[in-house]
Structures are given as C-alpha cells and as structure tokens.
Amino acid sequence: MDTITYRPARDELAYTFGGRIPVAHVRSGGMLQVHTEDCFGGLVRGPADLPSQVCRMPYLNPVSGPFFVEDAVPGDTLAVHLASIVPARDWGVSSTFPHFGALTSTSHTATLQPPLEERVWVYDIDRQAGTVRFHATDSDHIVDLPLDPMIGTIGVAPGGFEARSTIVSDSHGGNLDTPELRAGTTLYLGVNVHGAMLALGDGHARQGEGEACGVGVEIATTTTLIIEVIKGVPTVWPRLETDTSIMSVGCARPLEDAYRIAHRDLVGWVVDLTGLEQLDAYQLVSQAGRAPIGNVCDPNYTLLAAVDKLLLPQPQAAYDGVHARFRQHTDGPR
Amino acid sequence: MDTITYRPARDELAYTFGGRIPVAHVRSGGMLQVHTEDCFGGLVRGPADLPSQVCRMPYLNPVSGPFFVEDAVPGDTLAVHLASIVPARDWGVSSTFPHFGALTSTSHTATLQPPLEERVWVYDIDRQAGTVRFHATDSDHIVDLPLDPMIGTIGVAPGGFEARSTIVSDSHGGNLDTPELRAGTTLYLGVNVHGAMLALGDGHARQGEGEACGVGVEIATTTTLIIEVIKGVPTVWPRLETDTSIMSVGCARPLEDAYRIAHRDLVGWVVDLTGLEQLDAYQLVSQAGRAPIGNVCDPNYTLLAAVDKLLLPQPQAAYDGVHARFRQHTDGPR
Amino acid sequence: MDTITYRPARDELAYTFGGRIPVAHVRSGGMLQVHTEDCFGGLVRGPADLPSQVCRMPYLNPVSGPFFVEDAVPGDTLAVHLASIVPARDWGVSSTFPHFGALTSTSHTATLQPPLEERVWVYDIDRQAGTVRFHATDSDHIVDLPLDPMIGTIGVAPGGFEARSTIVSDSHGGNLDTPELRAGTTLYLGVNVHGAMLALGDGHARQGEGEACGVGVEIATTTTLIIEVIKGVPTVWPRLETDTSIMSVGCARPLEDAYRIAHRDLVGWVVDLTGLEQLDAYQLVSQAGRAPIGNVCDPNYTLLAAVDKLLLPQPQAAYDGVHARFRQHTDGPR
Amino acid sequence: MDTITYRPARDELAYTFGGRIPVAHVRSGGMLQVHTEDCFGGLVRGPADLPSQVCRMPYLNPVSGPFFVEDAVPGDTLAVHLASIVPARDWGVSSTFPHFGALTSTSHTATLQPPLEERVWVYDIDRQAGTVRFHATDSDHIVDLPLDPMIGTIGVAPGGFEARSTIVSDSHGGNLDTPELRAGTTLYLGVNVHGAMLALGDGHARQGEGEACGVGVEIATTTTLIIEVIKGVPTVWPRLETDTSIMSVGCARPLEDAYRIAHRDLVGWVVDLTGLEQLDAYQLVSQAGRAPIGNVCDPNYTLLAAVDKLLLPQPQAAYDGVHARFRQHTDGPR
C-alpha cells in the first residue's frame, strides 16, 4: 500500500478548512501517516503557560494538511479510516479558557460576568498502562483515566468557495470533537471541491462527552489513515462506521438541531441499507438508537445518532463494504 | 420490610404532579409495589387505535399515586430505589403522534407543514428471551431488540403551589424519559411539599436515546420500589445512582441548557463527594464524564451528566450510602 | 356597566394561575377595577432592600385574583380590555437579581460563575409629566424616560388540571412581560376551566423590549378592565388587539420557538380575518409583520407577531368587533 | 467628494465575504455608487421561475465587491453610511423556498416532513407613491405596503483567514437582513483584513421583522455609500447609528444568543458614550431599550439592541461624530 508520511513545519500548520493549497497528494487506497500538533500548537506545557497568553488568535487548533486526494471530485465520498492514533509525547494538557466552554458564559452566550479563572492541567500519559493521569491543582488528588486517543478535528474543504476556521464543525467535518473518532473508526465525508482537501489535527488522549470545559486532554499525535474515494456517492453530513455501529453526525446550535440533523440522516441511511420504509426506519431508530454527544462548547455543537448493525434487519454493507476492507489492513479486533 | 401494593382503578389515575390527594401512605424504609398503566392508558392495542383518536387530552401519560411518604418534609431528599420493573403484558406499543416528536415540527417548533402520518407499532415482549420484537409495518422485516424495562415518568409534587402535567419533566422529576431509570438504579428527588407525593408511570420496554419519535415501547408494569427519606439534605435537580455511576439530570430547552444544568450539578456533587476544588472537579468531569440523552421530544428535554465512581478520587458514599443499603434488599448484581 | 372593585389583602395574593378558588365573580360585559401589588409584594423600597433578602420564594410576582367570569367555559375566549393602568405610588423599583436576567448565567443557563452584584434602582414616577426618572447608582446621571404603564402578568387558569407559577408565561397567559399590554389594548385568552379564573399583577411603569436585567420598573397599580366572554370561539395562544394592530403571542424557549408560535398563529388569524389562502397570508405577514419582543428572561420567553390592520386586505373585525365595542367605553384616542 | 461607480458584470458577482480579490479601491471619505443584483441574481422574474429550479447553489445571494478601502487595517472600524438605496426596477419578487424560512422545518431544524409548496410572488414597486404592491396568488386580494428599501447583505472580509458564504451573518456583517439598514443609517464594521474588503447586495423593497418566509421583497438596487475609516478603534460586532438611535447587532443561534450579544455590546457602548458604570448602563438599557429583530431564517439569526440617544445621559458622539458628518453630505431629514 502506498504510504505517505507528513510532518508539518510550524509555518505549514493550517487554521482553516478550505482556502489553502495542498501539502501533499494521496491516491485513493493509499495510507497516510500524519503528525498532528495539539490544539495549542504545543505552546502550553505547564501551569504557567496560560493559553490566552501564549497563544494568539487565530493561531489555535492547527491542522496538518490539506491533502489532495486524487480522483476525488464533488459528489463523491471520501472514506477515511483511522488506523491508529498514537500520542506523540508522554503528557497532555487541558485548561479552562476565558469565556469558552459549556459551564461559562461565552462570546455568544454573552453575559456581563467575568470569566472563570484560567488554569492549566498537565496529564501524564502512560501508553503501556493505557492511562491518562489527572492531577488536581488544588489538592493531592490523582486519578488514572483510561487512555482513549481520538482525533478532534478532521475534515475536507467546504463547498461554496468557503474557508472555515478549524474551530468550527459543520457538514464538511472540522472540529467535531467526538470520542467516537478513535482508531478503528471509518469516517465518511462528502467531497465538495476537487481533491477533497483533507486535513486533521487536535488529538485528545481522551475527552468526556460534551467536552464540558471546552478543552480535552490535548495531545500531538502520529495518526495513520487509510483513504478511499467512493465514486458517485454523495454524503451530506459526516458519517462514521465501526465494526458494530453506524453513526450520523449533526453539527448545529441549538443542540436539538444537531440531534435532528443526525437522526434524520441516520433514518435515511437505515432506509438505504435495509429497505425499510421511512416511518418504519424512524420507529426502529427511535427504539434502538443511541445519541452520543460530541461537543457542547464549539461554535457548532456536535451530536451523533448511532445504531448497532445487529439491530438492523439484514443491512447492506455501507458504502460498498469499504470499512471491512479497511479493517483487513489493520491489526486486531475492536 | 413494610410492603404496600397499589393498583389504581382507572378513575384513580393521575395526570399531574401536585394538586392531588394521596392514594396511600408509605414509611421511610418501606417497599412499594405499584401497577402502572402505559402512556396511552392502555387504549392503544393495535394499528387501528390511533392515539389522537382513542386518547383525549389531557388524559395522556397517567401516573399511579401520589404516595404520601411519612416524615418527608421540604428540604429532605427522597431516595427511591427501582428494585424491579416487570412488563405487565406480553406486548408494548409505540406510534407516531401528530406534531409530536424530534423529527417533526411540533406545537412549539411550529411550522405550516402538515403532520407526519400517525401510525401504531405493536411489539412482542418475551421476558424469558429478554427481547422486544419490532415488526415493520410496511414490509416483512423483524428485529429483536434487547428488553430493557424502564420507568419514563416518576416524580414528586413540585414546590411553589404548582401542579404540573405528567408530560413535563423538571426539577421535581416527571416525564424524564431516560433509559437510565431501569431496575437497579436509585433516584434522588428533592422534597418540595409535606409527604413528598411520589407518583410514577409510563413504563417502556425500551427506548432509544432521545426517544426520537416521541414514544417509547410503551408498557404497563408492575414496579417495585424501596423508599427512604434522607433527612435535612436538599436535592435541587434529580440525581441517579447505580452500582458504578452517579448521574445528575437536567431538564430544559434548548437542549444545551439541560446539558449545563446536569453538568453544573454533577460538578457540585463531585466536589461534595471527593473534596476536589470546584475547577478541579470541572476539569475531571470534562475528561471523564458521559452525557446520556433522555428525551428530545417532551416539553422539557432531559439530559444526564454521569461519571463512573471508579474515576473519582476516594469518593464518599453518596447520600450516606443509601444506594448500597438498598442493594442488600435486591437480587443479584447488575 | 357593572363594576367590581377589588383590593387584595396581603394574604389573598396569589402565586399561581390555577389551583386557587376565586376572590370574586364578574359578569361578561362587566368592568373590574383591581389593585395590583408589584412583583416584590411591595417589599423592595430602597437600595437596602435586596430582593433576594427581603423576598422569599415562592412569594414573588403576586397576582390579584382569580376572578370567576360567569358563563365562561372551556372552548370560549375571554376578551379583556385594559381600560386604564394607573401607578399606585410615585415611585417604582428595579433591580438585578442573582442569576436571573438576560445578561447573566441563570438557574437554567447554568454556569460556574458567581452572580452579578445585586442592586436596587428606585425611579421617580411623575404622572403629570408622564415620566419615569432613572437615577444612576454609581454617578449623578439622571434621565427621564417616558411613562408607559403596562401589566406584566395576566392570565387564566391553565388546562389539564395544572397550576403554574406566576413567574411563567404560556398559552394561558401569565408572565408575558410585554410592553404591548398597555391601556387601550384588548387581550384574548382561551378559556381552559369553568369560570376562566382571570388574575393579574406585576405592573411596570415601563420596560425595555426583552426586560434585559429581568426586572422592569416595578409598580403597584390600579388597573381597570372590561371583560367579555366570546362564546364558542377557542383561542390557542394569547392574542392582542389595539386600534391599529393585531398581535399573536408565543411563549417558549428557545426564543425562535416563541417567534414560530406567534407567527404561525398570526398567519392563521390573518387567514380567518381576510380569506387569504395560507401561503398568501404567510407571504404577506413575512413582508408586513413586526415582531416585538416581550421578555428574554422569564422561564418562557415571550415574543409577539404583529401586523397593522391597514396592511390587511378588507379584514373582518376580530372576535366579532369586541375591541371596538370596548373602546366606546373608554376615553380618548390612542 | 471622490465618487466611484461600480456595476458588476454577471461573472464578477461574489458569493463569499473573504477569499476574493478587490474589484475597486476606495479612499476613506469617498463615495461609492454600487449596482447590486437581487438575491436570485435576477433570475426569478415570474411565477414560473421557481428559485430552486432557476438558481443553482452556491450561486445565491450575490454581492457586489469587494472594495478595498485604502488605509483600513485590522483594529480599525469602517463607517459606512447608506446615503441612498434606489430600487433598480419597478418590481420585486419574493418566494417560499424548500426547507428554508421560519415556519418550516429546514436543513438544520431537520424533520421528515416534505417542504411547503414553492411559490413566487411578484410585487409592483411604485417609487413615486412609495408603495410595494402585494398580489395574492390564490385570490384577487391586493395590498399596498410602504416602500422601505434596505440592504440585506453588507459586510467586510472576516478574520482568521476565513471566507464565509453571503447567506451567513456574523461579526463581519453579511446577511444581516434587518430593515434598519435603510438610507440614513450608518453601519460600523470592525476591519479584519488589510483593505477591509467591503461588499454588499441583497436589496429588499421592504421586509417584515424576522423575514418569516425566508425571502424579502427582493430587488436590484443602486446604492450610494459614503465610507470613512475610523483609525485605531476596534468594533467587535456590527453597530448602527441613525439620527436618533444607536444599535448593536447580534448574529447567532439560538435567537436568545443574538439578543445577548447585541445587548451586551450595547451596554458596553453606552458605558463608553456616557460614562455610566456597567450595571447602571445595564439597568438603563433594560428599561429604555428596543430589540428589533432582523432575520429568523438565515444560518445565523440577527437581532438588534437599540436605544434612543435622547434617553442617554449626555452622550458623547459615537465614533467621533462621523454619522453627523455623513449627514451633512446627504439630503433632507429622516
């Protein structure tokens, strides 16, 4: 399998999806090994590195790319398999950030209140033990949380000549911030521009559902992807597939609109895969579905609609079985 | 253990929390076995029984109760353990309902569009096999879903002299519609009026997260509860405890406010149980928390903030360990 | 014209719509002169009277009533004409209130931030000059604002056996907090229970649109109403009529749902009054309509959809011309 | 005064703010006369021209520009005075559009319901009479509405290397769709990129508040602007000034966040202009403010916070009095 390895120089990092020229070309069927920086560009390394001081807008949440995918044209779907996500360092960081997060007023949920205290947490990452160690800042408390690496931000160039900040999630992907984007998952993204222009970054050693404080356990990663172009099959909103589930992604405010988008898409997907009539599919998803929350802090919130394949009647393989093909190239079961 | 058994006559069913006189008295520490009707009052039994025709507002979502809990006064907490939830029949029903549900415009998300078709689905319940069988209405498809009985509506009388429809969820509980209210769970509710006035109903054989179509697999049940009054400990929003997790409930629109309510409450609860300082608790919940969705269809949406006890540093037992005491009275592990 | 005068004793004040026995009976066609207390029950009289200290939940926002309206039954409409609203004192008060208002996090838009400072403003009311004088608390600045008295809270008992806090607005009316409820306006409310059970309070010497800080210039009033029962004509959401406009009220969160409710209702009302087909009415309201905001601080936000009668083609008189009949009984033009 | 006249060729029309090279340069203090096309690019001319058939995404809502403003750099404010807005033709059009508008489910408030009927309305514009004539499509009804021309879409390039669709409103301006953008108004926009890159289009002969059906009375215009760069004064959200009022604009979903953004900004502006302390300004705006709604249909809703200058204590002239200077160059009172 073709493999391309890419490690961006600092001045190659991108801060938008769209509006950028590609850093490399990949073929459909090829593998891509990418180094990604953390959301702070690696500048927050300890309690004294307050993000609002060491980072400068808009130089937050850098992505590596974009990658031009040969043969990808508008109307196709790009299938991106997350083969592995390896933390690049033995630590990660999180923080509060002034007027950002779910439990604070923000630039948009605007109030007259001062921000919460800005503070940094440094986590120890032990890849062997599979743990992420939380240290309280105001007491001696320590907890080991399970290591569960994920990619927070991944997407293609949006359509309509737009270029969107990497802070944003939308139908082109972007800052989805869902723990479901872990190794073993295949992501489907509709192609909006010639070459798709895939980019990714913002790894998390783990995050809670909703990313309440606005920041996960942020890490640089080495992430390995396998890519395939599904010709002539459009995809409106991002979709995910694992060995056991299919999931549709909605990105919107208010959060119920993200729920609606994701669930309407999943109902349509179930119709396509099973031949169920639409209201029957709506009924089945209503009883069998899960609704994992991604983020409730970014400019668009992210929520997924998921259903186990086993709970669908005789489903067709999604996207012509590409997920199963990808899994042949990767180690072990999940 | 004191046990009271209660089976309401049809004209004893209640349609509000508050504004009702009690049907029975229970003591703190007592057990209560209650028959509950389904959300349609048992009137929807087949495809021809369209809910909007056989049911009449406001006679929807009946609850059994209220039960006067001796010694419960405002400022106390009522701990209610769901010891068992047994489907009363070998079938359940679901439906679409005109302008109700997540994937339709509604009375409040008001549009000029006509409603979706109203349709009824009848499910077979096999308690031995542990399955709920979905039959498509427009094709031959059949799927067996896991039986996972829950109570959709449970609460106490609200404060402030209010009486609230059983369709509504709020800080007094009510139509929470979360699958987390299964057997083995302890629910904590703040007491607002003398005697608490507990009532419950609206069993589901199972439901998806969000209850997308607005209706679960609706069943009558025999539900067994154990009740204890925690004196002098107030509870602002409903909380849940299982053997492994603690969870706070938020009920609001838009859905992000339910997220905020639940997570702020959980952060405070974690502070109380662990001695973590507030921002440390916020950080830990942000990385370790889950956010299971209850409903995205009722007048207030319901969302939970959850954290595994194992991921908390040396937690105190919640509410003086009442959940563990309850579990001594109930069979087997979960 | 029959006139009833009512001045509640302190312990007669009501804190819910519904769940109360009537304080007086009125006939259709009768006049009612009611003394209303301010939202603080008259307890906040100067800078030292912080509302959260001198008031006690749920004893906020008292209303006078309920009044049993003879011959009003479910399915009728109660037309209530605000003939005059006279401030009862030469001062009014406003305040910030902890975690209440539009520019602060709240109990529902819950954050970890401390509340804004609680502070009281006392206004001078000069009925002759028609002014409400604002005094800055932190400087010498003074401004005279136009006196524009309104009733903040007015409604009937809700249906479905409910009793709702007077803090809430909904389809039964309640805490609408819109400046459009001034003298000269007729309010239409659907009757939900025998006798309608009208109550009112919460006068404001004036308020801005949205009542940003959560509190208007709160006053006690003597308010004169004329009441008529429109038999057999249901009204789903509150409606207003002035000499020049018709307006529909929506109460909901998020605010766009209040917009949707109000506009869908207004489109239907325009259809009824003009014979326009529905999409034509939607189009006309889209170009000719106004959308005055009531409150963006109460449990349900309030927003109105309004259209000038002159911009409607040959409209029928609304509710059989009751507004014009009311105006014959009241002084002067508006 | 320097005057530049610009009339775009069809293939010069722009569909984003940002990501475009300038079509002309203007100096601070200069006048600009711009021809703008309507939101349909002039392609909808009668009932048979259904927008979803004659227009093609993303070629909707074209703007003329961008104009490079000399000497404008990030951190400055661009003051844009709307000197005149003249309808270019004697007709305008409106329509319903599938799954777009406030009283329909949409791509984001996603449901399973089919769209409302797509239909076109053609209005006669009589500049002499000052009227816009509505013709019902399903009956003979006709109404003359007041002509009140406005610019729906005006903005500068966003920061952060973004390019945003002209359908969107945000802090850079864009598809604000507020009737307050009529002749006589000065708009203040923060400059994000060198040269500001001003563009405008989407004239309306008039629109209702909220633009309920998603489309105003769409017209091509000849619009005359006067432009001045306010050096070293940043502006975060768009602001408007008329002879009598100052207004802050908020763009967001849900609609209450637009309210919060606009009102927080207005409170800060009042502090700056009057020297009132922040809570005093909050109080004054709460009682004196208006909250005109722009749109409740575009990707971000728009809502304004307004206050009459006469109700502010001794205000300083905003932005160094530029509005008054602009008015010296324009005819007649408003």
Image: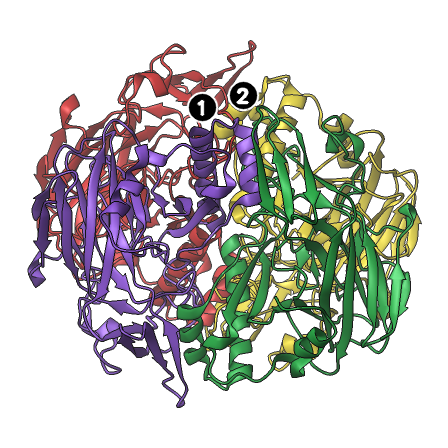
Chain colours: A red, B yellow, C green, D purple
Q: Residue at horizontal 83%, vertical 73%?
A: C30
Measured as percent of width and height from the top left, residue A113 is found at 52, 28
Q: Quadrant where the C terminus of chain C lies?
A: bottom right
Q: Residue at 91% across / 47% down in the picture?
A: C11
* D187 or A291, nearer to the observer: D187
Q: Residues within 10 Å of mark 2 (few under 14, many from 20)?
A: many
- The mark tally for this picture is 2
Q: Chain of mark 1?
A: A
Residue D207 vs residue B60: left or right? left
The residue positioned farthest toward the bottom in the image shown: D140
Q: Is residue C85 above or below residue B68?
A: below
Please report contact status of discs 1 and 2: CB closer than 8 Å, yes or no.
yes
Q: Is residue B135 left or right of residue A309?
A: right
Q: Looking at the rendering, which quadrant does residue C56 occupy?
A: top right
Left or right: where A53 falls relative to D231: right
Residue C239 in the image: state x and y as whole percent. 62, 69
- Location of mark 1 (residue): A96
Q: Label 2 marks which chain's residue?
A: B
Amino acid, disc 2 = Leu
Placement of A235 over or under D69, stated as above or below: below
**Rendered position, A9 above or below D132:** above
Residue hosting label 2 = B279
Q: Choose top left, top right, bottom left or bottom right for residue A33.
A: top left
- At label 1, the amino acid type is Thr
Mark 2 lies on a secondary structure that is: helix
Direction from residue D176 to residue D330 in the image, left or right: left
